[in-house]
Amino acid sequence: MDTRIYLLNGSANRWGNTHDMLCAVQAHLDAESEVASEIVHIASLLEDVHPPYCTHCSDPCEGACYRGTDLEQFYEKLSRADALVVGSPVYFGTVSAPLKGFWDMTRRLRSESDLLYTVGGALSVGGGRFGGQETTIRAVHDMMLIQGMIIVGDSSPEGIGHQGSCATRPASRDSAAAESLSRLAEAVVETAAATAHLREKRRKCS
């Protein structure tokens, strides 16, 4: 069975720098014979959700705010994912509004342990070399930790980056980021393969 990896574009700009970085990761993933990957634009999933953020309308979450939308269908897919690579541009040192809204509404997934043991990697792009990329990635990691995900760290001998893959605009011309993204893709695939038994056990118990 293929390793299923979703690459989440948290940028409001569908075809911007974050998308370019995710495409670079996907190119490496596509070179793997047993990996199936898909880039998903978060802002598009939120178009039919009003408001496009969590208001904590029920506890536990019943998913009422996104029932019958594309977002609900995608959340169902996430429970079968082996890994997520989450990308966001820097907004005041943290993640974008679409990504924050999307993740806040995963409360129901958390209550059902749907992302437990799912592998997670993160990437970010900013306007300068020290433009808040690492704090943005740390915010993504915090989101993943609360879901019980397995975070890919700086495991490559060559180094992914202390927090994750960071780029400076324009990302497509950042050679250091290109090398880091290839190592991130490799680490995500290897970690997903090594932890597959944990997700299989979770799904049998659910």
Image (tube, rainbow, N blue to C red):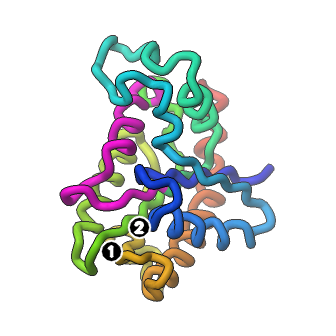
- In the rendered image, which residue does mark 1 sit on? 162
- Range of the magenta residues? 86-109
Residue 152 percent across, percent down from the top left: 46, 63
The answer to whether mark 1 and mark 2 are in CB contact below 8 A is no
- In the rendered image, which residue does mark 2 sit on? 153
| Residue 20 falls within the magenta-colored stretch | no
- Can residue 202 be seen by looking at this rendering? no
Residue 89 in the figure: left or right of residue 93: right
Residue 47 percent across, percent down from the top left: 48, 32
Which residue is painted at 35% across and 52% down in the image?
140
User: Which residue is nearer to you in this view: 191 or 164?
Assistant: 164
- Which mark is first along the chain, 2 or 1? 2
Q: Amino acid at mark 1?
A: His
* Rendered view: 198 above or below 138: above
* Rendered view: 15 above or below 40: below
- Sort mark 1 into few (<14), some (14-19) or many (20+) by Cα contacts within 10 Å: few
The circle on residue 23 is: none
Which residue is painted at 35% across and 36% down in the image?
101
Residue 171 percent across, percent down from the top left: 44, 76
Q: Amino acid at mark 2?
A: Gly
- CA distance separating discs 1 and 2: 7 Å
- Sort mark 2 into few (<14), some (14-19) or many (20+) by Cα contacts within 10 Å: some
